[in-house]
Amino acid sequence: MTDELATVETAPDPVTAGPAPEAAAAYGAPTLQVQLKMLDDGLEAPSYAHPGDAGADLRARENVVLQPGERKLVPTGVSIALPDGYVALIHPRSGLATKHGLTIVNAPGTVDAGYRGEISVTLLNTDTRDAIELRRGDRIAQMVIQRVEYAQFVPVNELSDSVRGAGGFGSTGGFTPRNA
């Protein structure tokens, strides 16, 4: 653990950088340093399961039982300091969603660069029959760190045209309804 400021180290843009030098970072090697403060020494730090994975696993800090349809805020024992211009997005784990119906209510959850508190995850059991039991240390979510663009909102009387226009909420179809 360190009290030094987070530093940003990015990999070269493959489009503009040309051929990769021999000393290029290995596939899945870190390209950004983020300060990490573990609030619970008994838990594993966020980690990537495989090289190249986008999401680092977050773990439950306490035992939790979620009844069908129930939601709970679950602490992870992790706090971070992101550099300005970055965000951490908290996503559900696909295996838990598929096998148990476990999801995150506000997916993806947003951890802003200025936030320094504990990352907690609002889990929801969408299963209609079975409770889900999570134990301390279980992997419950994935944290994806991304760059952020800061928009300047410019008031206009009319928006520029696009092919899509104002179509949304099923305007392109997607399934064939059954006739009653």
Image (cartoon, helix red, strand yellow):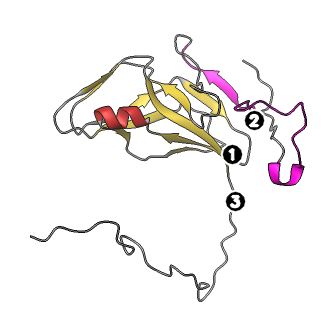
SS type, badge 2? loop
Q: Residue at x 64, y 28 (%)?
A: 51
**Of the two numbered discs 2 and 1 in the rendering, the one whose residue sits closer to the viewer:** 2
Q: Is residue 161 left or right of residue 71?
A: right
Q: In the picture shown, does residue 161 fall above or below 48?
A: below
Q: In the picture shown, does residue 93 fall above or below 175?
A: above
Q: Residue at x 59, y 27 (%)?
A: 50
Q: Give the labeled residue for mark 2.
A: 32
Q: Residue at x 72, y 49 (%)?
A: 85
* Contact? badges 2 and 1 (CB < 8 Å): yes
Q: Earlier in the sequence, mark 3 or mark 1?
A: 1
Q: Residue placed farthest to the left in the image?
A: 180
Residue 86's label in the rendered image is 1
Q: What's the CA distance linking mark 2 and mark 1?
A: 10 Å
**Region of the chain picked out in magenta, as a range:** 13-40
Q: What's the CA distance linking mark 3 and mark 1?
A: 10 Å
Q: Give the labeled residue for mark 3.
A: 150
Q: Earlier in the sequence, mark 2 or mark 3?
A: 2
Q: Is residue 147 left or right of residue 19?
A: left
What is the three-letter code of the residue carrying label 3?
Tyr
